[in-house]
Amino acid sequence: MEKLLVKTGVYSLFVSFLLLFVLIPREINTTDVNGMSSIVVTSYPDFVFNLIRYSIIITIIAVVVMYFVKFKNKKRM
């Protein structure tokens, strides 16, 4: 069971980082009170830290869900 949880953690961290890298935009379009819009670009370190933060959160959720699924299946047997 521990091996499965470790695999789930590693794979979900890797896959979530890659998907977030592709899906999250680095530029944010903002509109002020007068209706003027401007683009705010986040720096690369901030962008990477946000990706890592979201990837770790997704990984923790995936490992906890996998633990409860395995625990529930173990009780049935």
Image (tube, rainbow, N blue to C red):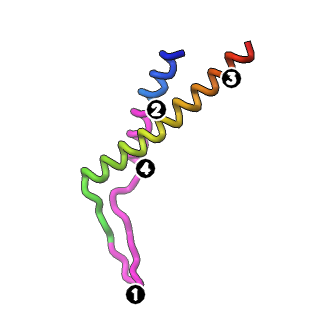
Which residue is tagged 3? 72
Residue 73, placed above or below residue 13: above
Question: What range of the chain is rendered magenta?
Answer: 13-38
At x 38%, y 56%, the residue is 25
Q: Check if residue 31 falls in the magenta segment.
A: yes
At x 42%, y 39%, the residue is 56
Instruction: Assign a secondary structure to mark 2.
Output: helix
- Quarter where residue 9 is shown: top left
Q: Check if residue 1 falls in the magenta segment.
A: no
Q: Amino acid at mark 4?
A: Leu
61 on left or right of 30: right
Q: Which mark is residue 12?
A: 2
Residue 35, placed above or below residue 38: below
Q: Position of residue 28 (x, y in %)?
A: 37, 65
Which of marks 4 and 3 precedes in the sequence?
4
At x 48%, y 39%, the residue is 58
Which residue is tagged 1? 34
Q: Which mark is residue 23?
A: 4
66 on left or right of 15: right
Q: Amino acid at mark 3?
A: Lys
Circle 4 or circle 2, nearest the eye: 2
Give how far apart the Cα atoms at labels 3 and 1 are.
56 Å
The answer to the question of whether label 3 and label 1 lie on touching residues, with beta carbons closer than 8 A, is no
Q: In terms of depth relative to the viewer, which is nearer, 27 or 10?
A: 10
Give the farthest residue toward the bottom.
Answer: 34
Circle 3 or circle 1, nearest the eye: 3
Instruction: Assign a secondary structure to mark 4.
Output: helix
Which of marks 1 and 2 precedes in the sequence?
2
Give how far apart the Cα atoms at labels 4 and 2 are.
16 Å
Give how far apart the Cα atoms at labels 2 and 1 are.
43 Å
